[in-house]
Image: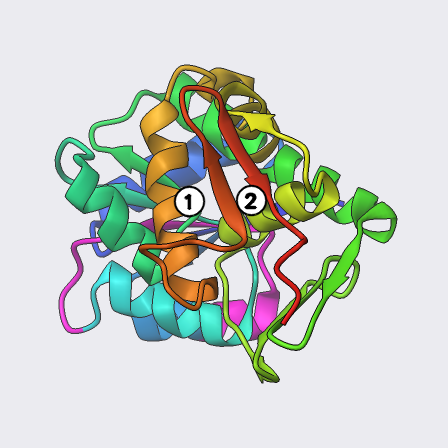
Amino acid sequence: MLEKVLIVDDDPAQVRMVSTLLNASGFKPIKASNGREAMREVVENKPDLILLDINMPELDGCETCRLIREISKVPVIMLTGQYKAETDIVRGLECGADEYLAKPVGNRELLARIKATLRRTQKFDTNAKKMAVFSNSYMTVDVPERKVTINGQRLRLTPREFRLLALLVENADRIISHQQVLEHVWGFEYVDDVDYVRIYVSHLRQKIEPEPSSPRYIMTEPGVGYYFRTVCQN
């Protein structure tokens, strides 16, 4: 069965170009010209991946991504109109995107990013039953169930945030290097993008730590990487 890629863009020429590329590369393109159409396609067609333009009228890419995240964990690649500076990455992260590409993007790079994102998502799901469960009175991380609770309340994480947390929990009390995190959560092509790890770890701490400025669970090993500490029993 062909993997379905939902293209969400209000530029018909861009949609046609990407659709042609996807068809020729063995994917099944699905089209939406705005956020509302995208939500309908997510429900009805259940795409395997979404290409989401950030600049759209009425409902922009970020708002659309937030709505998608309320009902689906489908990987989202957000297309931005400018260089992906740290502020842009953080904004996209807060929306729930998995990946960020600046337009214009070449066909080969776009296909490579799509395939890499799908590969990482599928690999993670396949191995999920082997993952660990961490639980104390404050937090539970159930990797097989893809569920995180804080003080008994379900916590919403983006797919990439969850993959990062799962990697740390699976290797609890062991230091994971920046390169290992990038390889397992982003892929080999990102092994030099250490800033990605720093930004995501900071954002993840804001969500799970009692005091993000003084973390008790996601610990930093300066110059090396991070580890999940399990001795913080409440």
- Amino acid type at circle 2 is Leu
Residue drawn where x is 16% and y is 35% of the image = 85
Relative to 162, is 210 on the left or the right? left
Residue 123 location, x and y as percent? 73, 38
- Amino acid type at circle 1 is Val
Quarter that holds the C terminus: bottom right
Q: Secondary structure at mark 1?
A: helix
Residue drawn where x is 39% and y is 44% of the image = 200
Of callouts 1 and 2, which one flags the residue occurring earlier in the amino acid sequence? 2
Looking at the rendering, which quadrant does residue 107 occupy?
top left
Figure disc tally: 2
- Name the colouring of the figure: rainbow
| Whether label 1 touches label 2, CB < 8 Å | yes
Picture layout, residue 199 above or below residue 74: above
Picture layout, residue 68 above or below residue 206: below
Looking at the picture, tell me which residue is in the foreground, 34 or 64: 64
Q: Which residue is mark 2?
A: 164
Residue 161, labelled with which disc?
A: none
Looking at the picture, tell me which residue is in the foreground, 211 or 79: 211
Residue 78 location, x and y as percent? 33, 46
Residue 201, labelled with which disc?
A: 1
Quarter that holds the N terminus: top right
Looking at the picture, tell me which residue is in the foreground, 200 or 43: 200
Residue 151 location, x and y as percent? 57, 82
Please provide the residue range marked out in magenta: 40-58
For label 2, count other residues whose C-alpha is less than 10 Å away and answer few (under 14), some (14-19) or many (20+). Answer: many
* Magenta span includes 210: no
Picture layout, residue 169 above or below residue 224: below
